[in-house]
């Protein structure tokens, strides 16, 4: 009996309207259905990726929105990958000058958002028989500094703290979910083109990178693809540094 083609596996990518998230969505759309979630409308980007890309709008800090994204993914096929790239940054300034509401916003989006979308996706991974979660952290989450010292001594303490929390969440989820065949890893990007660094300072920052340049969003996407692939089947709880040599730990 002809039962039709096997549905493609599905990847849910957050922050998919631009930069790293868009590059990740493009990488997965080669052989997955991709749900492209973002606070902004990702429809134009999804159209460029073709029929396998489905745009959805919502706030990663809203559990209802996260649940709706997961439901949309499962409507397309078995959910096998979640790459959480959505996040925010903030100005570099001394800690005593960081407004409380700014601190809380950064922590809520970057850390609580990671928790919310992972929590929503876990039951879907169980139903699909396992899968892979990749949370995008940051080199700043390991070092406490976010831009290689170009901020005149001021740090983004709220950003760095939020990403350190993402790293710890990655490891906690990996331990908790390993016995269910759900792998959880992170990526800690260094300085990447088109993200937090103003274009007029790219050359200055690149001069401080051992490899002599900034990274590209596509290189983070390639790392995410690897961590979600069968080639990484024995890797969980790891945070992969993709930073041009700016941190070697």
Image (tube, grey):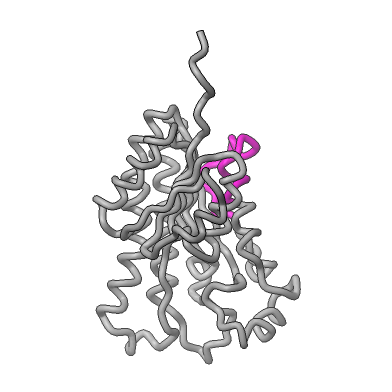
Membership of 184 in magenta stretch: no
Q: In this view, does 190 lie above or below 66?
A: below
Given the current orientation, which residue lies at the most extreme right position?
A: 211
In the image, residue 120 lies at what x, y percent? Answer: 32, 44
When the figure is inspected, residue 41 is found, relative to residue 151, above or below; the finding is above
Residue drawn at x 51%, y 70% as measured from the top left: 140
Residue 95 falls in image quadrant: bottom left
Is 239 inside the magenta-drawn segment?
yes
140 or 204: nearer the viewer: 204
Percent across and percent down for residue 69 are: 35, 47
Question: For the point 48% across and 74% down, which residue is it?
Answer: 144
Q: Is residue 244 left or right of residue 55?
A: right
Using the rendered view, name the quadrant where residue 70 is placed: top left
Name the residue nearer the viewer: 64 or 180. 64
Quadrant of the snapshot with the C terminus: bottom right
Please state if 23 lies on the left or on the right of 183 as rendered: right
Residue that protrudes farthest toward the top in the picture = 1
Can you give x and y, in whole percent of width and height, for residue 90 in the image? 41, 79
Question: For this rendering, which residue is in front, 25 or 177?
Answer: 25
Query: Measuring 46% from the left and 51% from the top, which residue is drawn there?
Result: 13
Residue 220 x, y percent position in the rendering: 60, 58
* Residue range (magenta): 224-240
């Amino acid at each position: 009996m002809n039962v039709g083609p096997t549905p493609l596996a599905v990847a849910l990518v957050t922050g998919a309207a631009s930069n790293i998230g868009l590059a990740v969505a493009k990488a997965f759309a080669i052989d997955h259905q991709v749900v492209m979630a973002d606070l902004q409308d990702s429809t134009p980007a999804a159209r460029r990726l073709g029929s396998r890309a489905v745009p959805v709008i919502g706030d990663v800090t809203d559990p209802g929105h996260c649940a709706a994204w997961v439901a949309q993914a499962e409507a397309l096929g078995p959910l096998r990958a979640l790459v959480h790239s959505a996040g925010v940054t903030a100005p570099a300034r001394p800690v005593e000058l960081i407004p409380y509401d700014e601190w809380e916003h950064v922590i809520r989006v970057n850390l609580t958002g990671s928790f919310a979308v992972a929590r929503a996706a876990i039951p879907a991974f169980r139903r699909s028989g396992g899968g892979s979660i990749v949370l995008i952290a940051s080199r700043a989450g390991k070092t406490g500094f976010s831009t290689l010292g170009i901020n005149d001594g001021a740090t983004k303490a709220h950003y760095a703290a939020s990403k350190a929390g993402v790293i710890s969440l990655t490891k906690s989820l990996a331990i908790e979910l390993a016995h269910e065949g759900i792998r959880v890893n992170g990526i800690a990007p260094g300085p990447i083109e088109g993200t937090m660094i103003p274009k007029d300072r790219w050359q200055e920052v690149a001069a401080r990178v051992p490899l002599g340049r900034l990274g590209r969003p596509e290189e983070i996407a390639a790392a995410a693809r690897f961590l979600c692939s069968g080639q990484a089947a024995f890797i969980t709880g790891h945070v992969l540094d993709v930073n041009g040599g700016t941190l070697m730990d």
